[in-house]
Image (cartoon, rainbow, N blue to C red):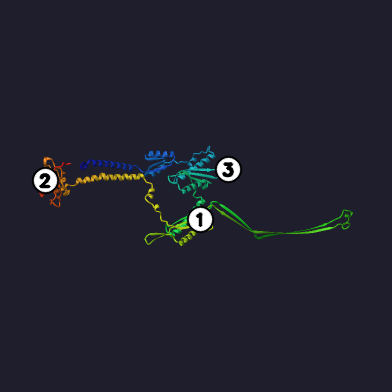
Amino acid sequence: MQQFQDIWNALDAKKRVIVVGSAVLVMLGVLFLTRMAATPNMGLLYSGLAPNAAGEIIAQLEAEGVPFEVRGGAIYVDEMRRDQLRLTLAGEGLPANSGDGYELLDELSGFGTTSQMFDAAYLRAKEGELARTIVANPQVSAARVHIAQSTQSPFRRSAESTASVSIRGDGSQIPNPAAEAIRFLVASAVAGLRPEDVSIINADLGVVMAQSGKETPARTALAHGERLKQNVERLILARTGMGGAVVEVNVDTLTDAETIVERKVDPESRVAISTNTQETSSSSRNQGGGDVTVASNLPEGNGQGGSEQSGQNSDTREIVNYEISETTREIRRVAGSIKRVTVAVLVDGSRRVDDAGLEVWEPRGEDELRALEALVKSAIGYDEARGDSVTLRSMDLSPDPSLIETPENGWVTSRPLNVMALTQIGVAAFVALALGLFVIRPIVLAAKTAERPLNDMPPTDLISGPQALPALTNAPGGEPMSRTRVNAGSQDLTQLTPQSLSAPAPSEDPVERLKALIDERQDETVEVLKSWIEAPEMTAQ
């Protein structure tokens, strides 16, 4: 304590203010860091809950004495205890499910429940169970399911069902594969429901998520173009090396479905397959008579007269059946069929060093370009009749200096900064710097100065001039002579150095040491004192 007091007394007013200010600043910095260290790092517990479910969770946290924060619709707790609290709250049935499931059927009684009431309750229960299953996905925080089933009617041929699902993410974008899985989940849980009849709505963005499994002409063309591009890149890069070529493939497809049926008949190429022949013959006989008289009643041959007629007819008919050559062709053009393929390839040239030692770029030769073009045509299945085209050029692919990444446009500037973490680091560094410069350093220097023995001072400090000598009490006029009283004779004293004086061995007392020097050099001492006495007096400052 005495040493500290001595150090404090040795400091002037300015240094005392600096020490006190530094100490206060260090205390405030330590207090701030301690408070930040004592404050837990808050992590998200639940978000997007219904108001009643969120109120139950807050009441339970208050009952258990767990510190928490409410930020909008989210509840934050200590990140170290977040998982434990989730398991504890789940064991107590919290958060409560937003939709009821098959528990609704337990509330129905056999009395007074009609078939319509049971069907409606069963549909609500199925929707609640599906919502629970969807929320079990870690990427989904909330879900609502709506199922529309048409009633059975004898006057309706088919009863089709549809469904819609509204989902909300956990803060990140819901991927299309997750939406496709939800679509198939709902379609499989409802009888007669097809996956294409289920609509998935992203509640965060307010958009309908497209079906990834449904093939469309545009999607088919894009996939085919990517395959062709990969094939061409493998061929070109095998020659030019990585980064030596740029390939773009465009596939035009038909967007309309068309069916053409063509029937061609050749009458010249007939073949008899059957022959039917019909023959018909007939004969007739007619006896003519005269007038009716008495002779008509006489026996035959007597008294009869007149003429007799007879006839015969024959008819032949032949029917031949022929098979005529017939060709029927059906052409069906579905949507997504390839209409045209165009390929653009940009290859880098070659570089060589000229006589001046500079690197010179040269385009590739025509023979090499033709060979590469032939390879590209073979890779894409080139069809000239279809209108395919391949364009291959050799150009310099050196990067533009303006596009090279610099500190202004690099990845560091695009990264989000954690302001709180940077603030903590800055405060800690400032406190450590202030502590070292304004507290530790002055204390160490003062301690070293106080502990230095007087006899360790160099001999030149004792004889360097009047300022190193104590005040003389026997000066004329009875006034003490100050150390700073300097005259022209002081130059003679400054010339007394340890090299020019054979000073005795240093003693423990500086005064004794000075006396020894005076005894050794009496003439020089008298001359110095004489010059001091004869010089005009100077007021000590």
Residue 480, given in percent of the width and then of the height, sits at 13, 41
* Quadrant in the picture for the N terminus: top left
In terms of secondary structure, where does tag 3 sit? loop
Question: Viewer-nearest of labels 3 and 2?
Answer: 2
Q: Is residue 460 left or right of residue 269?
A: left
**What amino acid is found at the position of numbered circle 2 in the picture?**
Lys
Foreground: 327 or 521?
521
Q: Where is residue 16 in the image (x, y as percent from the top left)?
A: 24, 41
Q: How crowded is mark 3: few (under 14 residues within 10 Å), some or many (20 or more)?
A: few
Left or right side of 266 for 422 = left
Q: Quadrant for residue 443, please give it.
A: top left
* Real-space CA distance between mark 2 and mark 1, rounded to the nearest whole angstrom: 115 Å
Vertical arrangement, residue 62 with respect to residue 307, above or below: above
Three-letter code, disc 1: Val
Q: Which dot, 3 or 1, sits closer to the camera? A: 1
Residue 530: which numbered mark, if any? 2
- Residue ID at (11%, 46%): 530
Q: Residue tagged by mark 3?
A: 153
SS category of the residue bearing label 2? helix
Please report whichever mark, 3 or 2, sits nearer to the chain's N-terminal start.
3
Q: What residue type is labelled 3?
A: Ser
Q: Is mark 1 on a helix, strand or loop?
A: strand
Q: Residue 392, percent across and down?
A: 47, 58
Q: Which quadrant: the C terminus?
A: top left
Q: Is residue 517 left or right of residue 200?
A: left
Residue at the right extreme, as displayed: 294
Which residue, given by chain and number where applicable, does mark 1 sit on?
341
Mark 1 nearby-residue class (10 Å; few <14, some 14–19, many ≥20): many
